[in-house]
Image (cartoon, grey):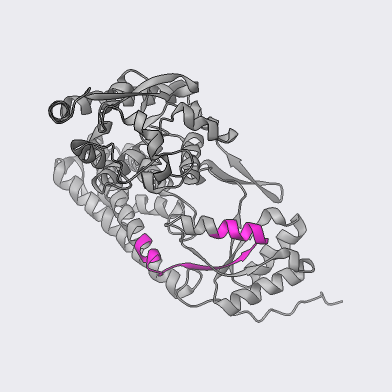
Amino acid sequence: MAAPTRDKPEIEAPAGDGPSGRRGVLRRRAFVVACDVGALIAGALIARRSVPTADLPWWSVVLFALTFWLFIIASNLYNSRLATDRNEELARVARSGVRAVIVLGLVVVVLGVDVGYRSIMFLLLSSVSTVGVVRECLRLWFARRRQAGQGLWGSVLVAGEEEAVDFRRRIEADSSSPHIVLAHVDPDECEGAEELVTRTVSAARRSGAQGAIVVESLLDARTANALVRGLLQAHLYVDLASTLVDISADRLATRSLGSGIVTWIAPRPKSGWRGRAKRLFDVVVASTVLAVVSPVFAVIALVIKVTSPGAVFFRQERVGRYGEPFDMLKFRSMVVNAEELLAELQLGNEGSGPLFKMKSDPRVTSIGRFIRKSSLDELPQLLNVLRNEMSLVGPRPALRAEMADWEPALYARLDVKPGITGMWQVSGRSGTTFAEYTRLDLYYVHNWSMLVDLSIMLRTIPAVLRSEGAY
């Protein structure tokens, strides 16, 4: 008896320039590969010119670069749909470089050849740096293209009405998102999994979408599996949208469990050696910066004293870690009775929620306007850092009065020390809404790491130079 057969579906794979289109994928992948190879060559040349030639023979450089590139491939860094952020991408690049050094070290030991180990470490540093810089440039370039409407991932959104509105809002709020929703299919309007698959594939064909974003929480296991298999059979990519929010992607790992899949989330402890490392970093950097800017510190204090009556420093009680109050220091940028005049200006409040912001605040002095715009008024908070009341990076230090309007979830921001800079400051500051400010604070608290702190500090410099949202 012949085995039962199925007709092969007549499905044409996308061949256009979209992320699922063969031409678009191959062009972008080839371009990124070429950039990585160029970066590895540049890193190798820098190392060869910076160390004694005898310590780093050409064969070791070629072996390292080739192995480094193979580990980059193994790290899935050429998958254009891999959901990684900047920190995760750089971490994968660094891990690939370290593995390449281990391979080179093993070859050196086995062959018994004379290679300078310090030179190998310099080769690692230069190569990881060049690849990291090139990857960051590519990230910025691709982001600009997406903002111009190029290289976007056209998708069909499979979600209920409320979830669809929320998801579209999240895509619009994320300027780095490559997604663009071209069609929407509501599972509640479909009779069974077969109709859901048919309608989703048809919507993709009509709209030119290359895949689908499926909010899987709305579907039972049987329907979700049937939908995913049907879309993949139709040569459409599938993004499964989780209901989790404010969890960094680098904390997630998918693993097999029997024939199913589970997602593992790593905890991020804030105490122990991590807390001590953060404190040591705060003290070293704050002390160094204070020593460097002390002349600027003195000049600002003198100008404030000469141009406006009152104290040089403005002290205001803020809420610190675990709700402990402390006096936050700033250079005084307003008239001495600014707090008394606040009630009269409430009608002109341009801030969101309990935050008071006014672009043309009449209480601000002439020198105060400059130091606020340039963020120089924040310099005295380095003293708060040394007093262990604040950190260099953390949530914005809140006023006690603001806490009356906090939702219960926002109290989690008290688990860490407030910071001079943070995700709120590098994301538009006064230009962000209170809801965005809340979301950014909670994202930082739940996903804190030293790498996140370093990333925020690096982003603070251009944000200050551009005076984003500062007034």
Rendered-image quadrant of the C terminus? top left
Question: Of residues 33 and 57, which is closer to you in this image?
Answer: 33
Please give the name of the residue rendered at 23% of the width and 35% of the height, measured from the top-left corner: 376
Specify whether 239 is left or right of 296: right
Count of residue discs: 0
- Whether residue 451 is visible, yes or no, is no
Specify whether 13 is left or right of 468: right
Specify whether 101 is left or right of 305: right
Please give the name of the residue rendered at 40% of the width and 41% of the height, measured from the top-left corner: 424
Q: Residue furthest front?
A: 344
> Residue 20 in the image: x percent, y percent?
51, 70
> What span is colored magenta in the figure?
143-168
Question: Of residues 388 and 62, which is closer to you in this image?
Answer: 388
Task: Inspect the magenta stretch and tell me whether residue 27 lies in it.
Answer: no
> Residue 42 in the image: x percent, y percent?
22, 53
> Residue 267 in the image: x percent, y percent?
55, 33
Q: Residue furthest bottom?
A: 10
Residue 104 in the image: above or below residue 82: above
- Whether residue 186 is visible, yes or no, is yes
Please give the name of the residue rendered at 19% of the width and 26% of the height, measured from the top-left corner: 309
Question: Of residues 167 and 77, which is closer to you in this image?
Answer: 167
Quadrant housing residue 285: top left
> Residue 73 in the image: x percent, y percent?
42, 55
Task: Inspect the magenta stretch and tell me whether residue 155 lies in it.
Answer: yes
Q: Residue furthest right?
A: 1
Question: Of residues 184 and 250, which is closer to you in this image?
Answer: 184
Please give the name of the residue rendered at 35% of the width and 50% of the height, measured from the top-left corner: 68
Rendered-image quadrant of the N terminus? bottom right
